[in-house]
Image: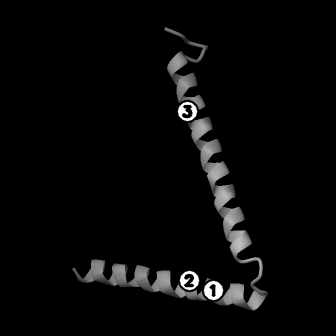
Amino acid sequence: MRLLGKNRKSLINENFFAKTTAGLDRQQKRIAGYLGRKTQHWNRNAKITALIVFCLIFGGIYLLLLICGIVH
């Protein structure tokens, strides 16, 4: 029984979560870089229009799912 020290299993879990978080962060940065390169030639109005279209599409889908969930 350890009252003041960390047990080995806790250290293994912390190490696992640290590696997982670092991996996810690295992958997120890689995807963000890719998307940045794909849209670097777009002007500000094109980016705003794409954002509005994205929000309308997925907001509409969310609203449809919400209404279907309430009706049924």
Instruction: Judge whether 3 appears above or below 57 on screen.
Output: above
Q: Residues within 10 Å of mark 3 (few under 14, many from 20)?
A: few
Q: Quadrant of the C terminus?
A: bottom left
Rounded to the nearest whole Å, what is the CA distance between mark 1 and mark 3?
A: 38 Å
Q: Earlier in the sequence, mark 3 or mark 2?
A: 3
Quarter of the rendering containing residue 14: top right
Instruction: Judge whether 58 appears above or below 8 on screen.
Output: below
Q: Amino acid at mark 1?
A: Ala
Identify the residue at image location x=60%, y=49%. 24
Rounded to the nearest whole Å, what is the CA distance between mark 2 and mark 1?
A: 6 Å
Check disc 1 and report the residue beneath it. 50
Quarter of the rendering containing residue 18: top right
- Between 8 and 19, the one lying in front of the other is 19
Q: Residues within 10 Å of mark 2 (few under 14, many from 20)?
A: few
Residue 39, given in percent of the width and then of the height, sits at 71, 77
Q: Are marks 2 and 1 in contact (CB under 8 Å)?
A: yes
Identify the residue at image location x=68%, y=65%. 34
- Taking 70 as reference, is 62 left or right? right
Identify the residue at image location x=64%, y=61%. 31
Q: Amino acid at mark 3?
A: Phe
Q: Residues within 10 Å of mark 1 (few under 14, many from 20)?
A: few
Secondary structure beneath disc 1?
helix
Check disc 3 and report the residue beneath it. 16
Q: Earlier in the sequence, mark 1 or mark 3?
A: 3
